Amino acid sequence: MSWITPSGGLIWHGRALRYRRLWTPFLQTIDHWLAQWQPPTSALLLLGASAGWSLPSRFLCQFRQIHAIDLDPLAPRLFRFNHAQALASSGTECTWSQGNFFNNTADVLKTYPDHAILFSNVLGQHALQINHIEQAERDFASLTHLLQGRSWASYHDRISGLADNARSELKPFLLTQRISAEALALRVARQGEWFDHSTTQILPASGDRLLIPWLIRKGRIQWVEAGSIKGTSEKSQLDSITI
Ligand SMILES: C[S@@+](CC[C@H](N)C(=O)[O-])C[C@H]1O[C@@H](n2cnc3c(N)ncnc32)[C@H](O)[C@@H]1O
């Protein structure tokens, strides 16, 4: 059990409290993007939930049941602090597991077969967390394979660097195709070195994705990618409308 990890724990909670104002444009964009994701289910599997600092209560309240998973032992208590009141008024039941979902991804997905799945700003830290880029890429390949047919969404870090090295126009933009970390850096950076979070392959090669700048702390910027994938049942509903 660890209170501080490369992707969460006390440092993350401290930052979320300290930089709340700086994060406002990013949080508003995530709020807007999540409001447009309408999975056809009343249950959510929330991976990397932490205290839900980046999650609007009104998004969570649309579900009847949420199962949240995080490594951080403090996460359930702080999540309750942020969202319990709203969840109680919408009647949303929230259960928790503490652990690493990459250790038993197939079992986790099987245990919650009817849940839509949200990777909540978690996949971009996996390579750092295990300190192994190739293993992280293998984990992502088997994860996306296991997710086939499911309704899921993710927002995750793509590249990060010094704010001084970024271009001045920091606005979200939409893409319809996958973009490599190098091409993204060419588009958003002026100069300098940018860290690649190894998440290029998470979303399918084609399909909408929103690229969002995030001033995570003074002088440091991350570009986050957000996208959602329809499950098999949603696709067949769509087909029946088209016919
Ligand atoms: C950047 S924080 C996430 C933020 C959270 N979604 C929020 O809105 O506050 C990433 C979280 O993912 C958790 N995490 C990272 N890798 C994980 C894994 N493999 N399994 C479970 N939790 C993980 C960390 O403990 C951390 O709380």
Image (spheres, rainbow, N blue to C red):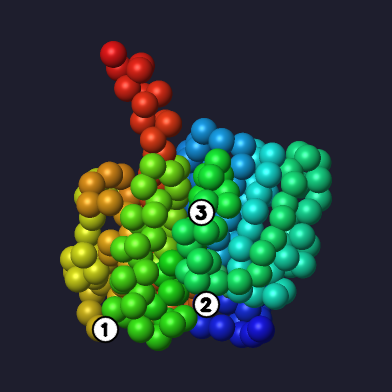
Which marked residue is nearer to the observer: mark 1 or mark 2?
A: 2
Name the residue carrying label 1.
193
Q: Position of residue 125 (x, y in %)?
A: 44, 74
Residue 2, numbered circle? none
Looking at the image, residue 7 sits to the left or right of residue 184; the answer is right
Image position, residue 2 (x, y; %): 64, 85
Question: Mark 2 or mark 1, which is nearer the start of the sequence?
Answer: 2
Q: Earlier in the sequence, mark 1 or mark 3?
A: 3
Q: Which residue is mark 2?
A: 7
**Label 3: few (<14), some or many (≥20) within 10 Å?**
some
Q: Is mark 2 within 8 Å of ligand 1?
A: yes
**Amino acid type shown at disc 3:** Leu
Q: Residues within 10 Å of mark 1 (few under 14, many from 20)?
A: few
Of the four image quadrants, the one with ligand 1 is bottom right
Residue at 77%, 67% (x, y): give it. 77
Q: Label 2: few (<14), some or many (≥20) within 10 Å?
A: many
Above or below for 236 versus 192: above
Foreground pick, 29 / 90: 90
Mark 2 secondary-structure assignment: loop
Spatial CA span between label 1 and label 2? 21 Å
Q: Is mark 3 within 8 Å of ligand 1?
A: no
**Residue matched to label 3:** 109
Against 173, is 156 above or below?
below
Q: Please indicate whether residue 57 sits to the left or right of residue 227 in the image.
A: right
Which one is in front in this view, the residue at disc 1 or the one at disc 3?
Answer: 3
Tell me: 146 left or right of 34.
left
Who's the residue at 36% across and 31% down the image? 235
Q: CA distance from mark 1 to mark 3?
A: 37 Å
